[in-house]
Amino acid sequence: MVTIILEFLDIIGSLAFALSGAIAGYKKRMDGFGITFLASVTTFGGGLTRDILLNSKPVAIFETPRYMIIAILAGLIVRYWPKHRDDRPSLLIALFDASGLAVFTAFGTMRALELGAPFHGSIIMGMITGCVGGVIRDVLRNEPPLIFYGDFYARASLLGSLLLYLLYWYGLPDIIAIISCVSLVFFLRVYVIMKNPVYQERAKHRLQFLRVKKDHRRR
């Protein structure tokens, strides 16, 4: 059961990170290859780094083609689906990134625990799995990585990884530990995102636009 849930979360996290990378590439006016490449490195950058550091064989991204398939699909969706082309790409990147960070933090921590990593190793591997893909994405698009600018990014990942380890250590079911970690990281990131004055201003303008549109329809 836990294995199935981990597989499901891995797919969800991969898709979320792939979409964040693809939208980031589109925002920088990259071509189809650039968008797909950025989606790819965002998807498996953290997991690849984790498996290399843990000397895990085979490396997860070489076990199955699903990561590359997900990245290609995300690239195609963002490249050719016009509905996403509004004034909110930065918010979309942030929300997809929060989802990927939450899921991959839990997935990375559990994988480290399964491989026998100690307390500090498990927490660090959880953070690496969750954060490195986003760092690579931001560096490649010439943007300052969120992890280095006090945006409560790495700290959210560390807190989630720590919570998962403590619940695991106290003997709670793995599924409870995983869901608790994902929920904590996601809600911490969303809270920080929504407190950002840039997103608050955009949300205010969007609400005003919807109200005007609704009034116009009534007339």
Image (cartoon, rainbow, N blue to C red):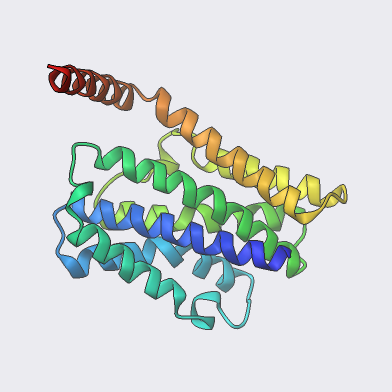
- Residue in the image at 73% along x and 54% along y: 175
Report the residue at 49% width, 57% height from top.
13
- Image-based side of 118 in relation to 154, left or right: right
Looking at the picture, how far across and down is residue 126, in whole percent?
A: 61, 55
Task: Name the image quarter holding the N terminus.
Answer: bottom right
Residue 103 image point, x, y percent: 56, 53
Q: Position of residue 9 (x, y in %)?
A: 57, 59
Q: Quadrant of residue 87?
A: top left
Residue sticking out furthest to the right: 171
Residue 121 point in image, percent of width and height: 69, 58
Q: Quadrant of the C terminus?
A: top left
Give the mark count: 0
The answer to which of 17 and 28 lies nearer the viewer is 17
Side of 210 where 134 appears, left or right: right
Q: Residue at x 61, y 38 (%)?
A: 184
138, 12: nearer the viewer: 12
Indicate whether 97 appears above or below 30: above
Q: Residue at x 56, y 39 (%)?
A: 156
